[in-house]
Image: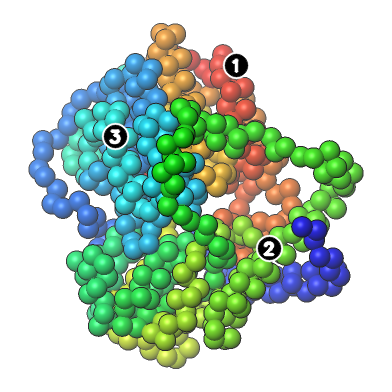
Amino acid sequence: MPRVQRPDSYYEEIKRKFAAERDLRLAYRPEGTAQFTSDLDGSLARYAVDPYGGPVPPRAPIDDTVEVLFIGGGFSALLTSARLRERGVESIRIVERGADVGGTWYWNRYPGAACDVVAYDYLPLLDETGYVPTRHYAQAPEIFAYCQLIAQRYDLYGLGVFQTTVTSTVWNEEEQLWHLETDRGDHMRARFVICANGTLSKPKLSRIAGMEKFQGHSFHTSRWDYDYTGANLEKLKDKVVGIIGTGATAVQAVPGLGENAKELYVFQRTPSSIDVRDDWATDPEWAAKLQPGWQAKRRAKALADPVLSDERKARLTAESRDEKIQRQERENIDYMMRIHKRIEETVHDRVTAESLKPWYMFMCKRPCFHNDYLPTFNRPSVHLVDTHGQGITQITEKGPVFDGKQYELDLLIYATGFEVQKTGIYNRIIGRNGVDLEDKYRDGIRTLLGIHTQGFPNMFIMGGYQASFQFNLTDMLQTQGDHIAECIDYVRSNGFATIDPTVDAEEWWVQEVIRHRGKTSRNQECTPGYYNFEGESNRRQDGNYNGGFKQYFDHQGAVRARMAENFEFG
Ligand SMILES: Cc1cc2nc3c(=O)[nH]c(=O)nc-3n(C[C@H](O)[C@H](O)[C@H](O)COP(=O)(O)OP(=O)(O)OC[C@H]3O[C@@H](n4cnc5c(N)ncnc54)[C@H](O)[C@@H]3O)c2cc1C
């Protein structure tokens, strides 16, 4: 459909509003990411406790050596160990803080949890397992069960050491082994370590004055207390519930809460953008017709260059860089205004509808897709508390306070998200010459492909910074898993003991990351959120590689094609 032509002043005015809304939020929270804490100890320790795993069965400390050890048991570990198994690596261990495999899908059991990427693409290894997701967007219990199915199919359960957290990972140069300590008194050694600790797995809380004083019940969304809420939230019928946060998790949880709670207060700082969720049950006839290799074909499409008509190609080639930026910016604004229109058409109360409008460019925050979130605000028992950029700053024994008003709650739910893409959560990583990974990264993250980091031989990182940004994360994790499996296979089959990227190869990648970041000033112009480190002016290398997923995949292949140049082998 041809775009409606609007005057420059229309777009300029919206951009001014975007900037004003961003500045408001930056002024409220100049401390950036420090406004959150993920060190959940002391009075906050209960927010990190696993409510699903049950009592931790006693066991003797482990003191042994394996070939490959995964820290974390989510999709990254499942995918990569499956690939390693295919290459004949048998001595594998998966150490996981939770009581089962699944990672994200073990921890996130809040009502309404589901993937936001089409399940036929998001769930990996569908060709291999023969499984077809039951819905276009699978719900969390199905995804968790699928993780268990992968573990069973590849016989991975025997490799798992659960309810165990790796606390330190230290390289021993003499033995050419990693030594790992855990919170269960284990002393494990491994030739290769794969940091599969997740991009969003350590819960974080906003630092809100008085939060420890709250006398009602409270928990983080990734530690849902079904004993309190009831399996179908039926125990909330006589409860006044509050939820802090309106990001991707809250958008999925609020409809169920709104339907079941006596009263629901949604405390909002910045609204999410919410588009239609095109969900449906998988058509069994379609599923029956799928030919072997169907998912690989879909994945190949994600990696292929887009097919453009000759006319469009000619138009794009004729466009200058500035024209391209302006066109993309205007398309983006048009999209956000459609999101606004959807809110106006759905939410009856004008004030609430205005408050729910996101004033920032698409993709400044994680986009959401839901059909029931906005209508939930039409329920008389559901109240949006719009803090207009400020957020809740005080909690008393009765509940949050905003604008001098006390909100008395029985239950307060924190939908405040997770620490993002950090390598070595719960865990200290020490490489060659006693260098702490955090110290190495202090002056800027340095990796090759976001997977290898010089001075940390035989260590591989999954889902960390400097890897490609990909909306379907499992696509990206799968390429990393394949790359890692090939690297390990190369080391083993060539009789080497170690693999470590060269200083030059690492420097090349850092420069590639920098070259592709900040092509426009969009990141700084965004409203604060985890995509832009809450508005902190970060170094350009401290983020994802923005050169494109296909390019990232091609770079992986190119690096492997020149192993001798890119790595030092010991
Ligand atoms: C609610 C939610 C919804 C999401 N939806 C989507 C989606 O629709 N599409 C998409 O592409 N991505 C989505 N994601 C991102 C999701 O995290 C990835 O898709 C993927 O599941 C990551 O897999 P992983 O194995 O890398 O990490 P995780 O699944 O996070 O697993 C990492 C595991 O490591 C464990 N661990 C961490 N540190 C230690 C340690 N020191 N010792 C022992 N164990 C440790 C953790 O307990 C965790 O179980 C979502 C994330 C969340 C939180």
Q: Residues within 10 Å of mark 3 (few under 14, many from 20)?
A: many
- Quarter holding the C terminus is top left
Observer-nearest of 292 and 80: 292
Marks 1 and 3, the one that precedes in the sequence: 3
The kind of residue on which mark 2 rests is Tyr
Observer-nearest of 35 and 251: 251
Observer-nearest of 431 and 424: 424
Tell me which corner region of the image, top left, top right, bottom left or bottom right, holds residue 276. Answer: bottom right
Q: How is the image coloured?
A: rainbow
The kind of residue on which mark 1 rests is Arg
User: Does 36 appear above or below 513?
Assistant: below
The kind of residue on which mark 3 rests is Ala
| Circle 1 SS class | loop
For this view, does 234 lie left or right of residue 354?
left
Q: Residue furthest front?
A: 285
Residue that label 2 marks? 335
User: Does 495 appear above or below 393?
Assistant: above
Tell me which corner region of the image, top left, top right, bottom left or bottom right, holds residue 217. Answer: bottom left
Would you say residue 105 is visible in this rendering? yes
Quote the CA–CA distance across marks 1 and 2: 43 Å
Tell me which corner region of the image, top left, top right, bottom left or bottom right, holds residue 397. Answer: bottom left
Residue that label 1 marks? 562
- Quarter holding the N terminus is bottom right
